[in-house]
Amino acid sequence: MQQEKYRRAAAMIKEAEYVVVLTGAGISTESGIPDFRSKGGLWQEYDPMTLATTRAIYENYSLFHQFYSERLKALWDCKPHRGHDVLAAWEREGLLQAVITQNIDALHEKAGNKNIYEIHGNIMGIYCQQCKGESSVNAFLQKTSCQACGGPLRPGVVLFGEALPQKIWEGAMQEVERAHLLLVIGTSLQVSPVNQLPLLMAGRGRMILINQEPTPLDDSFHLIFKEKAGETLWRIQERIQE
Ligand code: NAD
C-alpha cells in the first residue's frame, strides 16, 4: 500500500513537465535545525514577537543579537540530509525546475540546488539595518556596528512585520503559475502569504504534501505523506530510479 503511494508520487514527478517544490522548516529538522511549531520547536523556547522584529533591533538589541548569533552558530555543523540531496539530484536530472523555500538556513544551496527562491531571506546575508550596506557574519558575531554608518547589524532574514523581498516573491509566484506539479514539504502552511502559493494550483495542476502533521490545506492535495521528509523523498527516488 505504502509502496504504491511512493510509486504514484514517482510517476507524478516523472510525468509532470514543470515541477516546483515548496519547503518549510520541517525539511531541515532532520539536519538538526528545530522548526517553529512542532513540539520542542523554537517558539516554545523563545517568543518570536519579542525577538524576530525590527522593534527588537532598536529596543532590545542584546537579546536580538544573542538569538540570531545562537541560530548562526547552530548552523555551522548542520549539513543537508539525503532528502535535500534527492531534490538537488532531481534538479540536475531535469525532473525539478525550482525550489521555493521559507527556510533561512541555505541547506538547499549547500545540497546543490541552483534555482532557489529564499522568500524569507538567508541568515548569512548580514547587513546594516540603517544604511542597508552589506556586512559579514564575523562582524555580526563580534557585535560590531556598521563600518559605514554605525548602525546595528542584522541577519538577512524577513522579520515579523517586514515585507517579503518583492522580486523573489514575484519570481516564486511565477514559478508556481508555471508548475504542473507542486510538491510541498515540511511546512505547517500557517504563515502568510506563503500559504497562498498552493491556492495558485487550484483547478490546474497536481499537488503532493510531505508533512508529519496536518495542515489547513490537506484537502487540496492529491497525495499526502504524513512521514519524515528525508525518508519519503528517498523512497520516492528509489521508485523513480526503477
Ligand atoms: P513550521 O514550524 O510552522 O512547520 C513545520 C512543519 O514541518 C510542521 O507541520 C511539522 O509537522 C513538519 N515537520 C517537522 N519535521 C518534519 C520532518 N522531518 N518531515 C516532515 N515534516 C516535518 O514551519 P514553516 O511552515 O516553515 O514556518 C515557519 C517559519 O519559520 C518560516 O517562516 C521559516 O522562515 C522560519 N523557520 C526557518 C527555519 C530554517 O531555516 N530551518 C527553522 C525554523 C523556522
Image: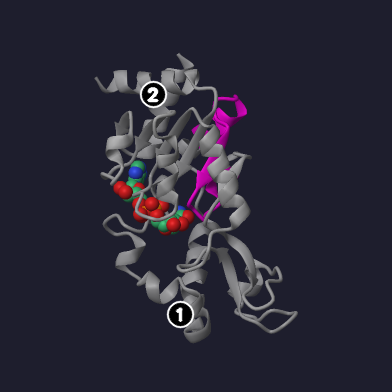
Query: Residue 165 location in percent, x, y?
Result: 58, 58
Query: Residue 139 location in percent, x, y?
Result: 66, 73
Magenta segment: does it hold 223?
Answer: no
Q: How many marks?
A: 2
Give the labeled residue for mark 1. Answer: 63
Tag of residue 20 = none
Quadrant of the rendered structure where residue 217 is? top left
At 48% from the left edge and 37% from the top edge, which residue is drawn? 21
Element at label 2: helix
At 29% from the left edge and 45% from the top edge, which residue is drawn? 215
Magenta segment: does it hold 92?
Answer: yes
- The mark that comes first in sequence, 2 or 1, is 2
Residue 124 relative to residue 230: left or right: right
Note whether 30 is above or below 85 in the view shown.
below
At 35% from the left edge and 71% from the top edge, which residue is drawn? 46
Task: Depth check: give the residue in front, 221 or 185.
Answer: 221
Label 1 amino acid? Leu
Residue 104 relative to residue 198: left or right: right
Give the labeled residue for mark 2. Answer: 9
Element at label 1: helix
Task: Depth check: give the residue in front, 166 or 184.
Answer: 166
Query: Residue 59 location in percent, x, y?
Result: 48, 86
Residue 226 at least partly seen: no
- Residues rendered magenta in the picture: 85-110
Quadrant of the rendered structure where residue 208 is? top left
Task: Depth check: give the residue in front, 54 or 70.
Answer: 54
Label 1 environment density (alpha carbons within 10 Å; few <14, some 14–19, many ≥20): some
- CB-based contact (under 8 Å), mark 2 and mark 1: no
